[in-house]
Amino acid sequence: MLHKGRDFVYIPGMENNPIFDRNVPGTTEKLAKATVGIAGCGGLGSNAAVALVRAGVGHMILADHDVVEASNLNRQHYFQQDIGEKKVEALAAHLKAINPQVKLILHDLELTPENVPAIYKEADLLVEAFDSADSKRWLIESWCVAYPDRPIVAASGVSGCGNTGAMHVHSSGKIHVCGDEESEMTMGLCAARVMMAASMQANVAIGLLTGDKE
């Protein structure tokens, strides 16, 4: 469910946008009002953001301090022409190309435990999309302390390839973790598995935002 405490801005015309003609009935109106925070715009964050915008999420807060590199293209939603560009700006352009009506707030900076609450204060839900386990840990802690009534959808164990049956969603209170929760970064990264985890994160987020909880 969406958190209370502020007035949601509905985007006029979203329900009549032909992009969403095939949406699950009743979801477009709810998602158009939602604000989702994306913490990190790499393999998880960029692909989750694309899935959420395609679903009809109307507002998104993107934060990342990196630029696009050639080595990102094997799993992240970027293209040759994006190399050297700031990730938040390149991703924003791709999201706008899907749905020009989406409202985006961009933060080209490094996220820290101190700035996360202020950057994502308007978010109904946060998608954790960091690489390192330590960063994931402090982000979840910072979010849960600042906004204990709002969900966070994280990922753990997205490395390697195959082993599809090991991917799952583990939920505990407001924390939802997608992945196999075992594989290590040293195994390497495959687009299919990273995108699978990102899609799981987006799917969980959509369920929470529309009231169809996991």
Image (cartoon, helix red, strand yellow):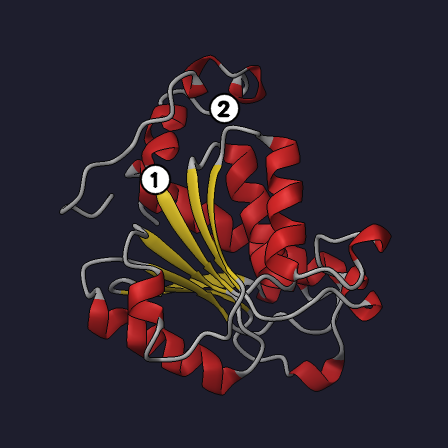
Going 55% across and 66% down the picture, which residue do you hit? Answer: 64
The foreground one among 134 and 66 is 66
Q: Amino acid at mark 1?
A: Ala
- Residue 209 vs 25, above or below: the answer is below
The foreground one among 110 and 71 is 110
Q: Earlier in the sequence, mark 1 or mark 2?
A: 2
Marks 1 and 2, Cα distance to the nearest angstrom? 16 Å
Side of 16 relative to 149 (left or right): right
Residue 117, position in %: x, y? 29, 68
Residue 144, position in %: x, y? 25, 71
Side of 91 relative to 118 (left or right): right
Residue 94, position in %: x, y? 66, 42
Q: Badge 2: how crowded within 10 Å, few (<14), some, or many (20+)?
A: some
Going 33% across and 30% down the picture, which residue do you hit? Answer: 30
Going 19% across and 37% down the picture, which residue do you hit? Answer: 7
Quadrant of the rendered image containing residue 149:
bottom left
Which numbered dot is residue 34?
1
Task: Say which quadrant the N terminus sits in.
Answer: top left
Going 67% across and 52% down the picture, which residue do you hit? Answer: 90
Q: How many marks?
A: 2
Q: Amino acid at mark 2?
A: Asn
Side of 160 relative to 57 (left or right): right
Quadrant of the rendered image containing residue 136:
bottom left
The foreground one among 113 and 207 is 113
- Residue 137 vs 203, above or below: the answer is below
Which numbered dot is residue 212?
none
- Location of mark 2 (residue): 23
Q: Secondary structure at mark 1?
A: loop
- Residue 38 vs 141, above or below: the answer is above
Q: Residue furthest left?
A: 5
